[in-house]
Structures are given as structure tokens and as C-alpha cells.
């Protein structure tokens, strides 16, 4: 439990800009990797981006999917990374709303 608490303390102190840039970087790299790994499955970069976005947000329509073993292993890693990134981003958004509400409440009292 102590390890989890330390991890959460570190995540809560991460800068919003760092999270945004990291998310964009993961999406871009994943798009390019999947396009290079499976050019027959993902005929364009947009198709690869579409698959990465639906996979990372856990929507997964099933219109595109990796067929090679390497592509499937990469997809499994992307599922886990996507869930983690989505959780951090949603947590940061909720935290920002809470901070805004708290600061706004102080302005009204003054």
C-alpha cells in the first residue's frame, strides 16, 4: 500500500504540459509503429491513428485490428498504456476542476 501511495503522490505532482506532450508523443509513435508493422492492415497513417485512438480510449470498434504476432503484442502493451494514460488525464482534469472551484470559492469570500 505504501508503494501505491508514493506512486500516486508522484503522479499527482506531474505537470499538465508534461502529460499533454507525453500523450501526444505516445499517440504519434504508436501510429507510426503500427503503420510500419502492418502496412496491409493499416493502409494509411490515418487508419493507423484511428486504430490507436480507439484502442487507447478502450472503444475498440473492431474495424481495424493487428493480424501479426508482433502487432498483437504491441496492441496488448498499448491497451495497458492507454488505460493508464486515460486514467491520469481524467484524474488531472477532475483535479483541475476541484482546484478551480476551491480558488473561486476563496474569491467570493474575500
Image: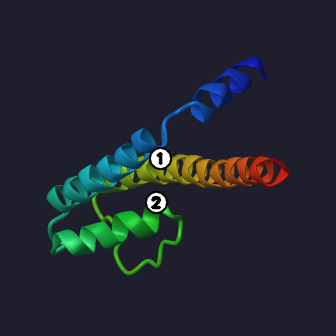
Quadrant, the N terminus: top right
> Can residue 67 be seen by looking at this rendering?
yes
Q: Nearer the viewer, residue 42 or 99?
A: 99
Mark sitting on residue 96: none
Q: Could you tell me if the residues under marks 1 and 2 are in contact, i.e. CB atoms within 8 Å? A: yes
Its colouring scheme is: rainbow
Q: Name the secondary structure under disc 1.
A: helix
Q: Position of residue 86 (x, y in %)?
A: 54, 54
Q: Position of residue 24 (x, y in %)?
A: 33, 52
Q: Position of residue 69 (x, y in %)?
A: 31, 53
Q: Name the secondary structure under disc 2.
A: helix
- Asked if residue 96 is positioned above or below residue 3 in the image, the reply reads below
How crowded pointer 2 is (Cα within 10 Å; few <14, some 14-19, many 20+) is rated as: many
- Asked if residue 84 is positioned above or below residue 34 in the image, the reply reads above
The Cα–Cα distance between marks 1 and 2, rounded to whole angstroms, is 7 Å
Query: What residue is shown at x 72% (from left), y 47% (from top)?
Result: 103
Query: What residue is shown at x 28% (from left), y 59% (from top)?
Result: 68
Query: What residue is shown at x 59% (from left), y 26% (from top)?
Result: 10
Q: Nearer the viewer, residue 62 or 24?
A: 24
Please name the residue that numbered disc 2 is placed on. Answer: 56
Identify the residue at the far front of this view.
110
> Can residue 41 be seen by looking at this rendering?
no
Please name the residue that numbered disc 1 is placed on. Answer: 81
- Asked if residue 71 is positioned above or below residue 51 in the image, the reply reads above
Asked which quadrant contains residue 38, the reply is bottom left
| 3 sits to left or right of 60 | right
Question: What is the number of callouts on the image?
Answer: 2
Q: Nearer the viewer, residue 100 or 46?
A: 100
Q: Nearer the viewer, residue 100 or 2?
A: 100
| 90 sits to left or right of 68 | right
Identify the residue at the far top of this view.
2
Q: Position of residue 101 (x, y in %)?
A: 74, 54
Amino acid at each position: 500500500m505504501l508503494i501505491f501511495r508514493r506512486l500516486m503522490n508522484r503522479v499527482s505532482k506531474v505537470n499538465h504540459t508534461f502529460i499533454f506532450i507525453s500523450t501526444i508523443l505516445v499517440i504519434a509513435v504508436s501510429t507510426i509503429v503500427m503503420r510500419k508493422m502492418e502496412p496491409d492492415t493499416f493502409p494509411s497513417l490515418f487508419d493507423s491513428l484511428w486504430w490507436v485512438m480507439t484502442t487507447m480510449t478502450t472503444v475498440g470498434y473492431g474495424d481495424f485490428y493487428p493480424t501479426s504476432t508482433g502487432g498483437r503484442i504491441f496492441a496488448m502493451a498499448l491497451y495497458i498504456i492507454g488505460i493508464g494514460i486515460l486514467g491520469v488525464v481524467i484524474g488531472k482534469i477532475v483535479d483541475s476542476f476541484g482546484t478551480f472551484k476551491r480558488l473561486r470559492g476563496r474569491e467570493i469570500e474575500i
